[in-house]
Amino acid sequence: DVQHLKDEHVELARMIHGLKIHILIEWDGYARQGNRAQGLFALHPCPILILHQEYLGTTGAQYIDYIITDRITSPEHLEDFNTEKFMYMPNHFFSKGHAMQEEVKDPTYDFEPMQTPYALGTGSPQENRCLSAPNLGPEEVSFVYCNYNKFLKMNPETVLSWIEILRRVPDSILCLLENPSDGIPNLYRFIREAAASSSNGGDDDGDDLVDRVHFLQWQANPFDHQMRNQDFCNVVLDSYPYNGHTTAQDALYGGVPIVTRSDGDDMASRVTTSANTVLGLGQLNAYDGPAQYEDIAIRLGTNPGMFNLIRARLVDTCLMRNPMHPYWDVERYVKNMETLFTMAWEKYLSGKPNEHLYLSANEGKPNQEEMNNGSYADEDRNEL
């Protein structure tokens, strides 16, 4: 336990060096204001430094050796945007333990009967209607879109897409998280102004749109929040260019498909694209930008047969056991990471410069056949 050294990066570096630790993982990067042992990694207290997960992007630092990623999230042609070399995990780089944790409820194909007052694990998203008052929004909700990211991940272009989707899916609602609640008036004001500017002299539907944007309170228990996904959400409308990351894994294991934009170059904007691809849901990736993003979401909200097929396919992956689906298989994930760490150590011992590390059947760069297997295929891209 080095808690007592959290603000003493020089002493912590000496301790790490004295213990002859081989590999050190940088978890925070510039997240959380970079306030954990600032300066520790710049001292390079051990031979290999690796960036992983919490901060999704390059550090821009010459002293970080590798960043853990995958070939969809960080394709080789974007390597010039990183100072680190890529450490490529197969399938998906983001760790998630949902299928292994007893506290996490498996998704179900059908919904339990609704209860009043609401009880966790009961009712469909249409019935629960984001726990809003019955007189707010449509009398009968047809479809529930959601996004449970902090407001800081929203931008005008994405919210304009959400407005268009609500307009074209009658009686649908958008369920967001009060995070923060102080931002709700600003969001409502933006929606009203956007609606007025796009009315083209016709009816201003700003008030109607505002009535269809509902909010859930923050749930401090992360397991309860994860379980709420199935109860409150039919489809996630992903944020761009900063995707949902942990919230996305929670939604996916709740059996909630995610529509995402796949036209960005930022690592943080490609995480869901990779997830959908590995899960066999590449048709939810909007490679052509906002218009396609809107179109996919609208089709899911107006075609029950298509939506039910997509949702069932996702739930199938969550319930697979013996073998577990690669996306949810923690044991496989750990073994793959251990192998990559060993490869990085062997590269260090060889005295050769760092280079991208690929984990595949032949421990080399994947060939075309491997690129076309289930881990990387996107054959469903045009299915919708």
Image (cartoon, grey):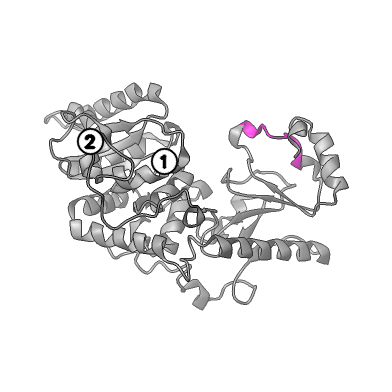
Q: Is residue 35 magenta?
A: yes
Which of the pair 233/343 is nearer the observer? 233
Q: Quadrant of the N terminus?
A: top right
Q: Which mark is residue 224?
A: 1
Lower position in the chain sequence, tag 1 or tag 2: 2
Which of the pair 85/339 is nearer the observer? 339
Classify residue 140 by image quadrant.
Answer: top left
At label 2, counting other C-alpha atoms closer than 10 Å, the crowd grade (few under 14, some 14-19, many 20 or more) is few
Position of residue 232 measured from the top left corner of the image (x, y, whole percent) = 30, 42
Which residues are the magenta region? 33-41
The residue located at (23%, 60%) in the rendering is: 306
Q: Which mark is residue 116?
A: 2
Q: Amino acid at mark 2?
A: Thr
Residue 370 lies left or right of residue 112; in this view the side is right
Front label number (1 vs 2): 2
Q: Where 138 sits versus 338, above or below?
A: above
